[in-house]
Image: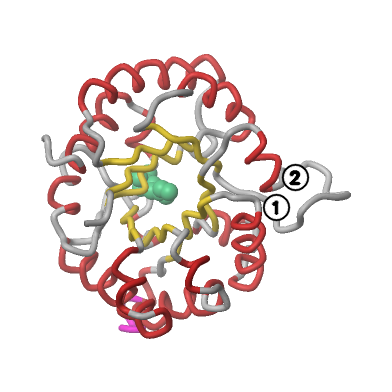
Amino acid sequence: MRQRIVAGNWKMNKTRDEGLALVSELSNMIADEVSGNVQVVLCPPSIYLAAVGKMIQGSGSIALGAQNCHQKAAGAYTGEVSAAMLRSVGVQYVILGHSERRQYFGESNSLLKEKTDIALEAGLTPIFCCGELLELREQGVHLDFVRNQLTESLFHLSNEQLRRLVIAYEPIWAIGTGKTASNAQAQEMHAALREHLASRYGQETAQEIRILYGGSVNASNAEELFASPDVDGGLVGGASLKSREFTDIVKAAAGKS
Ligand code: 13P
């Protein structure tokens, strides 16, 4: 049985006071309502990581995640944050290869290979994002495209390293659009990705990897999306900015909605 994960990606939203107020609400609501079977990950902007980490310290069900890290260990990279720096302030997870980073910051599969390596080296758990544009789905090449994202960025990893990863499938056409993948579309992709992992790492390892769905997940569609056998939780954007809505998504993952 894979433990489900619900991760909230705040993206570039919230001032410090707004962000900390949200964490304070969430830590009360989630402590009451979630049993040990869902791992919640909060991914605020990096400038608030230490403060959020302090607030959730000691909470078994809420962990801290960053939205990005640099691909090098240290050095003259003005403005950047390294994986080891994140780890040193208590970060456990890091989102890598989000489609917004791929699109606006030119992150390629080969760059993400480096980022994955450095994150693992620092002891972080990467939440590795993949997903296709609508036109690729319309051309019927979406499965191959996303499989290739995994091959090019992850397939150099050892079996032991891969087991430390979480994958997030986020179809780009579903991000921030209010359109979600249907259950069948999500299940088809998640099963294809698990099969792809199995072809390189074996069934046993593939069955252990959590594959999250992201793209307009909200309190009303979460339960249905999480019901698919290969969907192990969600990576949530907009709906993670509201305490009630995010808590309801966590409840759906815990089977308590
Ligand atoms: P939305 O939930 O706002 O569609 O964003 C999804 C996402 O990009 C999470 O990383």
The x, y position of residue 103, in whole percent, is 56, 60
- Locate residue 126 relative to residue 119 in the image: left or right: left
Cα–Cα span, label 1 and label 2: 6 Å
Q: Farthest residue to the right: give it.
A: 76
Q: Quadrant of the C terminus?
A: top left
The x, y position of residue 92, in whole percent, is 52, 42
Q: Quadrant of the N terminus?
A: bottom left
- Whether residue 137 is situated above or below residue 218 in the rendered picture: below
Q: Is residue 119 visible?
A: yes
What residue is drawn where x is 58% and y is 30%?
49
Q: Is residue 176 visible?
A: no
Chain part drawn in magenta = 137-141
For label 2, the SS is: loop
The answer to which image quadrant residue 66 occupies is: top right
Residue type for callout 2: Glu
**Along the line of sight, the residue nearer the viewer: 153 or 3:** 3
Which residue is identified by label 2?
80
Q: Residues within 10 Å of mark 1 (few under 14, many from 20)?
A: many
Residues under numbered marks 1 and 2 in contact, where contact means CB atoms less than 8 Å apart: yes
Q: Which mark is residue 207?
A: none
What residue is drawn where x is 60% and y is 48%?
68
Which residue is identified by label 1?
70
The x, y position of residue 235, in whole percent, is 36, 48
**Along the line of sight, the residue nearer the viewer: 66 or 245:** 66
Residue type for callout 1: His
